[in-house]
Image (spheres, coloured by chain):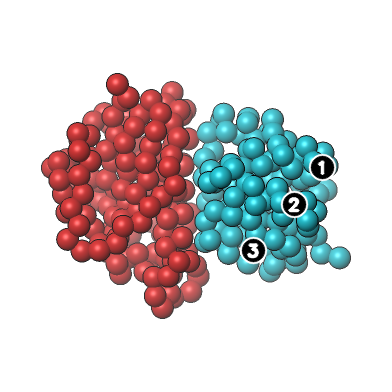
Chain colours: A cyan, B red
Amino acid sequence: MPKTILITDDALFMRVTLKNLLVNNGYEVVGEAVNGKDAVEKYALARPDVVFMDITMPIMDGIAATRAIRESDPGAKVIMCTAMGQKQMVMDAIQAGAKDFIVKPFSPQRVLESIQKVIG
Amino acid sequence: MKAEYINPFVQASFSVLEMVLNCKPTKGAMAALPQTFASDQCNIICGITGPLQGQVIYGMSLSTADAIASTMLGTKIKSFDMLAASAIGELGNMITGHSMQILAEAGWVCDITPPSIVRGSNVQISTISIPAILVPIILEQGKFSLTIGLQERK
């Protein structure tokens, strides 16, 4: 059974790029969310193995969404994937329960290694 | 405008453009812009808020925008559709995000607004009371103009 992934990003380009990369490497993308609220709802329905989460998004940001997902499922594995790599942002993400932090632009290798790291 | 505000954007532009477009950009001559200036045909506008505020505008011709979007998407685009616009917008977002990281390390912790894209000819832009600096960057895909208008919050 392929590992399942939920992608969260408000930018269509990032969703398409990540999806192609993941599908070409044997993962199943079970959903694409366009903001944090959408991610919380889609997580509850799909219960994916891993969530990719952007931070700066409309309606609900990725930090708040990570917190909400981890409250509903303390075992949820969230990887932040954002253009904002400030130290404070990384700390906020880790405190919210994110397992890893990828700064865009990313290399395909970095994304694949991160998944391996969080799902063990 | 202080060089310490400009350099992070130049540094971030080079590093992000090199990685995303797999190219070696070169820097042109920096210039101060008048209060109102003619924009390029395609512009990504990102706002900056916090102790520093203003805008950064990444300008290029329509053909350069098409060429950059094609490189980012790994396929030659037929038209500048939503996906191409999203790619170009994300390029601006990544450069601005990376600049914020460099500015934060220098003690200026700022946030950015989502990018907007303005396309068209004969568009006049004004950063109103914030002086703007132009830094041209030459890419294989064409000229990529970095316009930075930033000031300390009063």
Q: Are discs 1 and 2 both within one chain?
A: yes
Mark 3 residue crowding within 10 angstroms, few (<14) / some (14–19) / many (20+): many
Quadrant in the picture for residue A66: top right
Instruction: Look at label 2 and name its amino acid.
Output: Tyr
> Can see residue A72?
yes
Q: Secondary structure at mark 2?
A: helix
The residue pinned by badge 3 equals A19
The residue under label 2 is A43
Question: Looking at the image, do the residues carrying marks 3 and 2 touch, with CB atoms under 8 Å apart?
Answer: no
Q: Please say if B77 is above or below B110.
A: below
| x then y, percent, for residue B6 | 31, 36
What percent of the width, then of the height, locates residue B23? 41, 59
Q: Of tags 1 and 3, which is closer to the observer? A: 1
Q: Specify whether A44 is left or right of B129.
A: right
User: As shown in the figure, which amino acid type bears the numbered disc 1?
Assistant: Asp
Q: CA distance from mark 3 to mark 2?
A: 16 Å
| Quadrant into which the N terminus of chain A falls | bottom right
Q: Residues within 10 Å of mark 1 (few under 14, many from 20)?
A: few
